[in-house]
Each structure stands twice: as C-alpha cells, then as structure tokens.
Image (cartoon, rainbow, N blue to C red):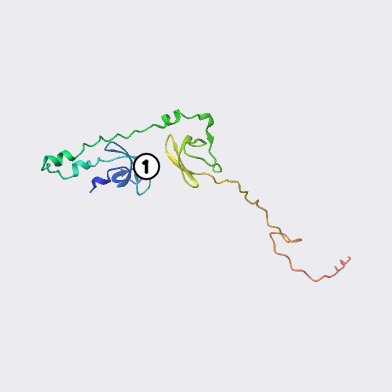
C-alpha cells in the first residue's frame, strides 16, 4: 500500500524494471505535477522512465473532511496558494548561455567547480552540477555521471626504481655455492 506522503521526489513506488525484469521498489527521481516521470530501481540502481500505473493522488486517499461547524472556523483558513509546476530545463537550454570554446578538457588531475563546462572524451560536453571532496557530478546530454577530480594535485609521486641485484650475482638465480679451488688436470695425449 502506497502512503500519500511517499508520492513525492525521493519517495518510493512499485514499478517494472526491465533490467531486473520484475516489479520492484523504486525511488522517485522526477515528477511533473502529480505524475511520476523518472525512477531508480532500488535493487540494481538503474534509472529509467516510470513504467507502471500512476498511484492515487494524496487527496483521493485522504478521508473526506467534515464541513466547518462555525462560520468563524471557515473564515480563519487562508486560501492555499496554487502549487507551482516543475520546470524542466533541457540540456541544450543549459548549454545556450555557456561558451563551449572555453570548455575545459576533463582530467582526473584537474579540479572543477559548479557550473564549469567540461569536454569529456567519451561523453562530450557536460556541466558540473555538484562538487564533493574528490568527486563531481556532471550533467551530460544523455545522463548524469559521477567522476573523480583533483587526484593529481601538486604532490610528486616517487619514481619507480628496479631492485638492485647483489654484485656479481644473477638476479633470477640464487648465488652458486663456491667449489674448492683446484688446478685443472692436463688432458691425456693419445
């Protein structure tokens, strides 16, 4: 049973996941008005459009209210402001105001900040939407990806040196046991 308070972004709903090929619990990622549009499977974490029946609205599940018993009680309630609709800005509209010639090439060594435009070799142009200590969320045309950043820093990594073999010994063989020194015998003639 879906509770009315869970029909919101971040709430849960049952939906069909094609990757798992089952009806499973999903987290709601996007809504337009009261309609669920995008969900994430809680089992495999794949994101997809909502597939399933839209749950009943919160108002239809609530018990009907009694009429106000006194005129004063009805007058004291202020009218509710209409709910604003969710405005979805397309990726192309977000890129319109950005100078793509100044887009920085993505590198794990670089450090980025929110609203930086990035040119990624695989995913193309993207906009940094969130920054954490060593990770950034980048909105690309196809998806939002979490990538590492700031891993190069100014610190120098030590250079690798090969281990040195002991003097006079082969590196891949143990040192040979020394034989007592003898003089070679002359070869028989004949």
* Residue with the most extreme left position: 69
* Image point (18%, 40%), residue name: 76
Horizontally, is 173 left or right of 19 in the view? Answer: right
Q: Residues within 10 Å of mark 1 (few under 14, many from 20)?
A: some
Q: Is residue 146 above or below residue 182?
A: above
Give the image location of residue 172, x and y in percent. 68, 59
Give the image location of residue 166, x and y in percent. 73, 61
SS assignment at label 1: strand
Q: Nearer the viewer, residue 33 or 81?
A: 81
Q: Count the numbered circles shown.
A: 1
| Residue 188, image quadrant | bottom right
Horizontally, is 102 left or right of 170 in the view? Answer: left
Q: Nearer the viewer, residue 165 or 89?
A: 89
* Image point (54%, 35%), residue name: 104
Give the image location of residue 48, x and y in percent. 35, 40
Give the image location of residue 31, x and y in percent. 31, 38
| Residue 51, image quadrant | top left
* Image point (22%, 42%), residue name: 58
* Residue with the most extreme right position: 189
Residue ID for mark 1: 47
Horizontally, is 127 left or right of 16 in the view? Answer: right
* Image point (15%, 42%), residue name: 73
**Image quarter (top left, top right, bottom left or bottom right) of the C terminus:** bottom right
């Amino acid at each position: 049973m879906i509770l009315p308070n869970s029909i919101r972004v971040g709430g849960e709903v049952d939906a069909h996941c094609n990757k798992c090929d089952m009806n499973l619990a999903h987290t709601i990622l996007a809504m337009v008005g009261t309609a669920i549009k995008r969900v994430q499977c809680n089992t495999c974490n794949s994101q997809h459009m909502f597939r399933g029946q839209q749950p009943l609205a919160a108002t239809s599940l609530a018990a009907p209210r009694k009429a106000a018993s006194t005129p004063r009680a009805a007058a004291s309630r202020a009218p509710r402001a209409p709910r604003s609709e969710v405005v979805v800005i397309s990726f192309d509209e977000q890129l319109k105001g950005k100078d793509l010639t100044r887009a920085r090439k993505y590198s794990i060594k670089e450090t980025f900040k929110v609203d930086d435009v990035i040119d990624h070799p695989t995913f193309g142009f993207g906009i940094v939407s969130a920054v954490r200590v060593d990770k950034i969320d980048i909105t690309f045309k196809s998806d939002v990806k979490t990538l590492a950043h700031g891993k190069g820093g100014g610190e120098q990594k030590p250079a690798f040196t090969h281990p040195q073999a002991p003097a006079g010994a082969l590196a891949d063989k143990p040192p040979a046991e020394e034989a007592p020194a003898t003089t070679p015998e002359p070869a028989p003639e004949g």
